[in-house]
Image (cartoon, grey):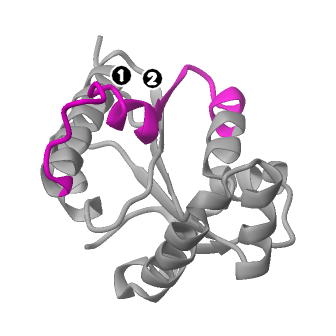
Amino acid sequence: MGTSIEKTIYIISGPCGVGKSTVAKELSRNLKHAALISGDDIMFMIEKGYAPPWEEWLSITWKNILSLTRNFVQHDLNVVIDCVVESELEWFCQHISDLNIPIKYIVLIASEDKLIERLNKRGDDHLIDRSLFLLKKLGSSAGNKKYIYDTTHKQSSEIVHDLMHLSDFYVTEL
């Protein structure tokens, strides 16, 4: 049980309704020996009725994502993380660096109209304001510039192919 340089950690970020989960699932099916970590699943493990302050909730979530990632990598698995990344990328990369495994990071975006259409179609219209806020925040972040990928006119299979085969998304320096 050791780490293998062929393995990769894929982090898929973006606003609500952009296709993170669809892309993450398809990517994990296309990789040999992959584990899929859903940030939403981790975040909502905390029972309703107890709601720590937002920053603490995010911290707990990311520490759990980190622990799961380390465990999966140590068991020679590729890891696909489906989670909105607002400011956690540098922290995550620092805390996983000892494993010496490549990390690919992609920030999926789409036009405002496309996000609204997708959220309405799936019955998540209550997420529209959050999605548009995240679209602006993630799209304007200097640290995200080289990792932005517009999904407005793309199929998930095309996005997965590009993520797997293009070197553009490797995290090199933070």
Q: Position of residue 131 (x, y in %)?
A: 56, 68
- Above-or-below relation of 100 to 31: below
Query: Which one is in front, 53 or 98?
Result: 53
**Measured from the top left, where is residue 41 in percent x and y?**
43, 31
Q: Is residue 28 magenta?
A: yes
In contact (CB < 8 Å): disc 1 and disc 2:
yes
Q: Quadrant of residue 26?
A: top right
Residue visible at 35% across and 80% down?
Answer: 143
Disc 2 marks which amino acid?
A: Leu
**CA neighbours of label 2 inside 10 A, class few (<14), some (14 to 19), many (20+):** many
- Taking depth in this image into account, of 169 and 122 the one nearest to the observer is 122
Quarter holding residue 74: top left
Where does the image place residue 24, in percent across and percent down from the top left? 62, 41
Q: Earlier along the polypeptide chain: callout 1 or callout 2?
A: 1
- Residue at left 29%, top 61%? 89
Could you say which disc has been placed on residue 153 in the image?
Answer: none
Q: Which residue is mark 2?
A: 77
Q: Is residue 49 above or below residue 122?
A: above
Q: Amino acid at mark 1?
A: Phe
Residue located at (24% from left, 44% from top): 62
Left or right: residue 142 versus residue 92 is right
Which labelled disc corresponds to residue 72? 1
Stretch of the chain drawn in magenta: 27-54
Looking at the rendered structure, the secondary structure element under dot 1 is helix
Query: Does residue 156 appear left or right of residue 7 in this picture?
Result: right
